[in-house]
Amino acid sequence: MSISRKVKEIAPSLTLEITAKAKKMKADGISVIGFGAGEPDFNTPEYIIDSAKKALDIGFTKYTPAAGMLELKKAVCDKFLKDNNLVYDSAQIVISSGAKSSLYHAICAIVDEGDEVVLPSPFWLTYPELIKLAGGKCVYVQTKKENGYKMTAEQFAEIITDKTKCLILNTPNNPTGAIYSEEEIKAIAKVAEEKGIYVISDEIYEKLVYEGEKHYSIAQYSEKMKDLTIIINGMSKTYAMTGWRIGYLAAPLSIAKAISSMQSHTTSNACSISQYASVTALTAPEGEQFIAKMQKVFDERRKLMIEMLQDVDGIECVQPKGAFYVFVNVSKLYGKKYDGVEINGSLTFADCALKQGIALIPGIAFGNDECIRLSYAISIEDIKEGLTRLISFINLLK
Ligand SMILES: Cc1ncc(COP(=O)(O)O)c(C=O)c1O
């Protein structure tokens, strides 16, 4: 059996690999605190669940239009207007089976074989694989800790060639928790606009911002920039609906139409029941309350993480202002040994930490081998226990 070249080149998800290892250890009776979670640890709110039950009861169980049911597209347009001051027509919205699916379709719609896609590093680990699948070439921009792991407009301008097709911008960011400020985004937009570069703007963590930070979408910069932008967002993180698989995008009409026709062949449409419940999620007043509550809980955990990590010798973390991750630089510990094994990168760090009952994601999965990613989508008790273990693990290194 021969596997296609394209698919052979796809790396399996390290996140899932570590999560599986940790699960096995737990099943074997070993205590492991998992800092790997990529999803809110909250249940989907009851009012959304009730709406899905209603969808079943009224028989809303058939195909929907490929780009999604009109009511949901309208609710998404209202969301863009209310939250981002962006006017979209429902024909510019495509509902997909999760933001991951929206991203893949968006990349396929604009990237031709050999086109360059600019990716600020660290990056969410799925982007390079989707770019490769679409036949594009990833061009990485190494961001600096001093800049809060954010790409500057100067770095962006320098990397552009005549093959550059698009930039993938992710704010708030996974894995760093960084948020690009309005000024930083405007400077990047100016470059993109001048050079006619598309921007796929992944805004899935939009609602998870702290310390009074405000999310700013690059499409807000100007009408011209809006015509170069595909915004990706979804229900997973905002409404704790990861398993429901609803993502959405907003794009210039011709791109939205192309994506819709592609999607009509790849997935037909996103799950009708989840779409129905998503209309309720976005429009019912309970939504705001749920988001505010979740944000408050995440913020308390974020503060605890920073407090417990800030004075630990040998590690450094840039204060995360969004999402639910802390990206910790552990490179000063490289060269030390744990149980005879030399720690020479984020992979050995993660392997050894797992032996001490802490599951974390090595930064190399996100393009930065100096760091590890810790998620705080876990309880306060687990954070306390897990970080206590991490600190004793670090103290054990000789
Ligand atoms: C940055 C980023 N974008 C997109 C997604 C995908 O979300 P969805 O569950 O909607 O596919 C994730 C999920 O972890 C993410 O971290």
Image (spheres, rainbow, N blue to C red):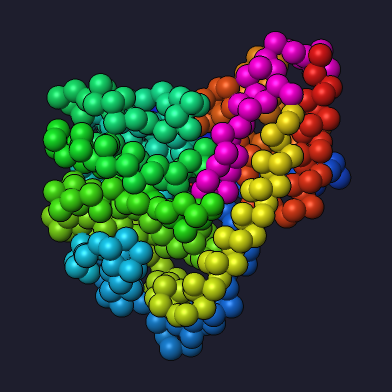
Q: Quadrant of the C terminus?
A: top right
Q: Is residue 267 above or below residue 392?
A: below
Camera-nearest residue between 112 and 314: 314
Instruction: Name the outermost residue toward the right.
Output: 29
Q: Is residue 84 left or right of residue 9?
A: left
Q: Is residue 328 above or below residue 193?
A: above
Residue at 83% in and 17% down: 339
Q: Is residue 191 left or right of residue 304?
A: left
Residue at 20% in and 38% down: 190
Camera-nearest residue between 22 and 223: 223
Specify whether residue 397 is in view: yes
Q: Position of residue 35 (x, y in %)?
A: 68, 43
Specify whether residue 137 is in view: no
| Residue interval drawn in magenta | 313-342
Q: Is residue 163 above or below residue 220?
A: above
Camera-nearest residue between 287 and 61: 287
Q: Quadrant of the N terminus?
A: top left
Residue at 52% in and 46% down: 321
Q: Position of residue 134 (x, y in %)?
A: 29, 37
The part of the image, by quadrant, that contains residue 359 is top right
Q: Position of residue 248 (x, y in %)?
A: 34, 60
Q: Is residue 327 magenta?
A: yes
Q: Is residue 393 magenta?
A: no
The part of the image, by quadrant, that contains residue 84 is bottom left
Q: Position of residue 260 (x, y in %)?
A: 23, 59
